[in-house]
Amino acid sequence: MTAMIDIAALDDIPRQGARVVKTPLGCVALFRTATDEVFAMEDRCPHKAGPLSEGIVHGSQVTCPLHGWVFDLATGRAQGADSGAVRTFAARTEGGRVFLDATLLAARSAA
């Protein structure tokens, strides 16, 4: 079982919006759907490195703000004719709090 760390209040993430968490592995976008599901993925589109946290959340997808690529929040895979994927991370909510995969925060760079 993955160790989880309390990272934020659910209300800190707007519905159909996102917040960014800086980790030793890079920036991670936390997304909240209209039904209060929470997903975590890299905050960087593989197409042109667009900040996905600034994209439009619709259903369980996010559209990149730069070129319109659409990603499934659960799998990180691009939808439609676009190809590519974004790394996703374990996230969950409990008691109004958002928990994120602890390995993201525990990783240390060699520098």
Image: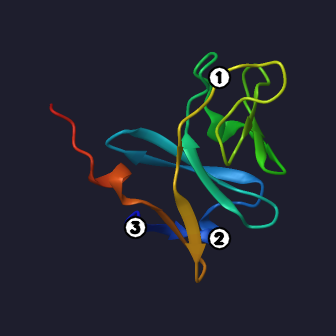
Q: Residues within 10 Å of mark 2 (few under 14, many from 20)?
A: few
Q: Residues within 10 Å of mark 3 (few under 14, many from 20)?
A: some
Secondary structure of the residue carrying numbered label 1: loop
Residue sitting at x 65%, y 70%: 11
Secondary structure of the residue carrying numbered label 2: helix
Q: Residue furthest front?
A: 1
- Res 29 label: none
Q: Residue furthest left?
A: 111
Placement of 42 over or under 2, stated as above or below: above
Left or right of 103, for residue 13: right
Contact between marks 1 and 2 (CB within 8 A): the answer is no
Looking at the picture, how far across and down is residue 35, in whole percent? 80, 66
Q: CA distance from mark 1 to mark 2?
A: 31 Å
Q: Earlier in the sequence, mark 2 or mark 3?
A: 3
Left or right of 22, for residue 74: right
Left or right of 39, for residue 28: left
Looking at the picture, how far across and down is residue 8, in whole percent? 50, 67
Q: CA distance from mark 3 to mark 1?
A: 29 Å
Q: Residues within 10 Å of mark 1 (few under 14, many from 20)?
A: some
Secondary structure of the residue carrying numbered label 3: strand
Question: For the residues carrying marks 3 and 1, which lies nearer the camera in this image?
Answer: 1
| Residue to which mark 3 is pinned | 5
Placement of 95 over or under 74, stated as above or below: below
Placement of 90 over or under 5, stated as above or below: above
